[in-house]
Amino acid sequence: MKSKNFQQIFYPASIAVVGATNTPGTVPNDIFTNIMRSGFPGPIYPVSPGNETISGAKAYKYVLDVPHPVDLAVIVFPSSVCSMALEQCGQKGIKAVIIISAGFKETGQKGKEQELKLKTIADKYNMSVIGPNCLGVINADRTIQLNASFARKMPDEGSIGFLSQSGALCTAVLDYALNKLIGFSKFVSFGNKMDINEVDLLQYLFDDEKTKTILLYLEEVSLGKELFELMRKNKNKKPVLALKSGRTSAGMAAAQSHTGSLAGSDEVCDAAFRQMGIIRAKNIEEMFNYAIALTYQPLPKSNRVAIVTNAGGPGVMAADSAIENGLELAKFSPETTEILKNALPRMANIKNPVDVIGDARADRYDAALTSISKDNNVDGIVCILTPQSMTDIESIAQLVCRVEKEMDKPLLCSFMGGTDVASGIRILEERQIPHYTLPESACQSLKTAVRYTNWLLRPESKVKKFEINYSKAKEIIEKSVNDKKSYLTEPSALELMSCYGFPILKHGLAKNPEDAVKIAGDIGFPVVMKIVSSDVLHKSDVGGVLVDLQNSEQVQEGFKKISDAVRAKKQDADILGILVEKMANSGQEVIMGIKRDPSFGAVIMFGSGGIFVELMKDITLRTVPITELDAEEMIKETKSYILLSGFRGAKPSDIQSVKECLERLSQMAMDFPQITELDINPLVVYEKGCHIIDARIMLNVQ
């Protein structure tokens, strides 16, 4: 794997703009002008066939004509000549290139071929390339001040790194951030990611001292496994927030299992992000709401929050939002309560939320915020202000900044309104105090900070490795693949599950009524009978299942009844026999399964099982391999956990056995990529142990 030349991309000593023009309002001209005006300290060489100068600077016909070394080339030629320009950059010895030009794989097959040609050239000369089809790169570090993009303005220096697959979104984000005085460390539009991708850039920002928080916009996750490994390696290093488009699934292929139908691509992405510790936002505003809380403020030690307001209504709304977001309204210490009682008017509410009353000036906010900030029962504060005739907004904003400077816990503000509070908001933003138009947004952001704290404090957990009969399992799967059978028959599926130590019921395959009677007698009544045929996927739909058979006569009659029913509805079905299985005792029913995701690989699903699984949709997902803690958290995230724990006086079920089944399933998914979908539905859980009632396994036989 070739090294990535990030030093030359973000801190070049010299730059060549290849394809620069003198035409104002064009991308080539804007790129060159932005680099010049941003304050970049090194030489800039315009390459422009047919022009002697660009914006007063000497121009060169080809990049090979530049008489000095070049660290970074920014190519803005039309796509048709980009390969020639990149070839010359390679010959020149340039190791870092940004290709702004569009017209490549995003346009179709011809463009894809052109992009592959660029990739070949880049690899030949060990060049690191961002793009093509991108906005460019901005490094707001004051030592370099590089704006190698066609964004309208240079952002302020800050400690947020922003990576985006979309160039158009970048311009909107920059404008949004400038309006709120939010600065950036690095700002990158990586476009088609022909060479450098989001995983490469994330690793760079993890190691970048100037970056404290990383924001990521993706239109698709094509490197799920690589992203997962990167986040695992850099666990707890820096918060990563992601905005991924495509939440809804349009035209998803019909899945052949409950797991396949319930685990859509966005649900998998959501689960994978949570498992990696990536915080997912729904929109730009939400992303930056979270980012400023995580970047500008210390992390909360717990979810105990205090609310200070000069208006009762917004205070109550904030309290409701805090509770809804899993925060706890802190109970003040006696010392804090006494200070508030002495400092605030009699009609003020000195309990949480604290109401300093509508005519409050800075002194009341000072007394409330200062005392509460020192209270060990409080780990976060939301400060609300509404503009009333006597409210000295700027003084209160200055006071908030002073108190915040002395605090070691997060302080988030909501100065509600617009024009009247604008000057106060600007003071807060200049001092990097997180401000939110609505208190609810502040509570949501504080909740996100608490969750990130909890993520950092998660105990280390390992992936268990079980002793299994791998050779027998391999034999079962390979036979079905070689026979081009997409589905394992139920006896084969149960045998495979047995190889991995799953608890299965006694059973046997009957070829005739006499076999069925003998098997039933051996395993003991009552029994269940099920059709076994690779051509019958949903057995109940064709009358292929009978339950609670109590004696030999019922079994003998049942064999004929099932055979006749299946033949009537599936005349050409290849019937291998009828499975006779010990009937399970009643217990709590759960479902678990495997699905293959094109980005993240194998995914494990768990949830409430039985006949209502599609209706309930009470599921949770993880990518494999899962740790012991992952398995435990999966169970606790579903409503089935309430039932398994013992609902309304019922005895608790054996949750440990369920957890172990999830871990064994994870190992199976890792061992056999041939398994594309798998359902265990239901797994019946008892006070001690559990049993698989039905298992459906689909294989890739291509």
Image: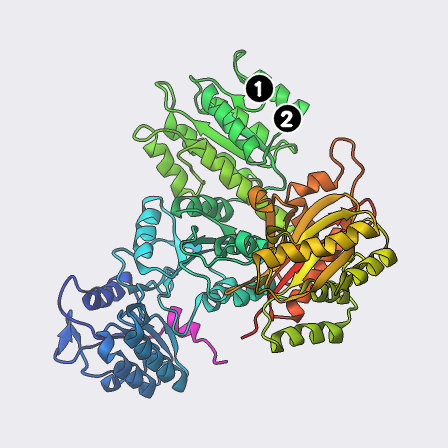
Which residue position is annotated with label 1?
Answer: 350
Which three-letter amino acid code belongs to the residue tagged 2?
A: Phe
Q: Position of residue 701 (x, y in %)?
A: 57, 73
Answer yes or no: is residue 403 visible. yes
Point 79% across, 56% down: residue: 505
In this image, 404 relative to 72: left or right? right
Image quadrant of residue 171? bottom left
Point 32% across, 60% down: residue: 167
Residue 394 sits above or below residue 566 on the image: above
Residue 168 sits above or below residue 447 on the image: below
* Mark 2 neighbour density, 10 Å: few (under 14) some (14–19) many (20 or more): some
Task: Out of 96 and 637, give the one closest to the viewer.
Answer: 637
Task: Out of 314 and 71, give the one closest to the viewer.
Answer: 314
Task: Out of 157 and 171, give the one closest to the viewer.
Answer: 171
In this image, 269 relative to 621: left or right? left
**Mark on residue 273?**
none
Q: Position of residue 551 (x, y in %)?
A: 83, 49
Looking at the rendering, the stretch of residues picked out in magenta corresponds to: 1-16
Which three-letter amino acid code belongs to the residue tagged 1?
A: Ile
Magenta region includes residue 432:
no
Tell me whether the residue at label 1 lies in contact with that at label 2, contact meaning CB atoms closer than 8 angstroms. yes
Colour scheme shown:
rainbow
Which residue position is annotated with label 2?
Answer: 332
Point 83% across, 60% down: residue: 519
Magenta region includes residue 2:
yes
